[in-house]
Image (cartoon, rainbow, N blue to C red):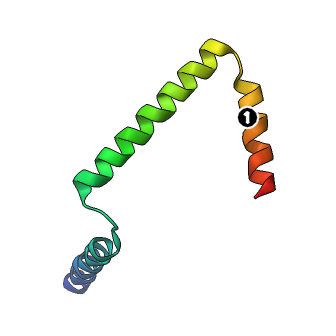
Amino acid sequence: MKNSTLFAFIAGAAVGAAIALLTTPSTGKEMREKLKERYDEEKERKAQRAYSGSCCEDNLESINENDAQ
């Protein structure tokens, strides 16, 4: 019983890893760079909003843009 459970776990992990590798659109390094870039952009945008005090206006504009789509 224990061997079959362990085998099922290992087989599932291998299948999951294979699917992840096959469906990932970019390499890990590229993905980390994109995530860091996106994080830095959002951090800067939030800092600008906090400084200018226009946070509510920006949110309203983005809501209106999303509704239009």
Say if 10 sits above or below 54 in the image: below
57 vs 32, nearest the viewer: 57
Say if 47 sits above or below 38 in the image: above
Residue at image point 35% right, 40% down: 36
- Residue 59 image offset from top left, x and y in percent: 73, 34
Under tag 1, what secondary structure?
helix
Say if 14 sits above or below 33 in the image: below
> What residue would you read off at disc 1?
59
Residue at image point 71% right, 31% down: 58
Q: Choose top left, top right, bottom left or bottom right for residue 20.
A: bottom left
- Residue 33 image offset from top left, x and y in percent: 30, 45
Q: Choose top left, top right, bottom left or bottom right for residue 60.
A: top right
Residue found at the far top of this picture: 51
| Left or right relative to 49: residue 63 | right
Other-residue count near label 1 (Cα within 10 Å), few / some / many at <14 / 14–19 / ≥20: few
Q: Quadrant of the N terminus?
A: bottom left
Residue at image point 33% right, 68% down: 24
- Residue 12 image offset from top left, x and y in percent: 30, 79
- Residue 34 image offset from top left, x and y in percent: 36, 47
- Label 1 sits on what residue type? Asn
Q: Quadrant of the C terminus?
A: bottom right
Q: Choose top left, top right, bottom left or bottom right for residue 35.
A: top left
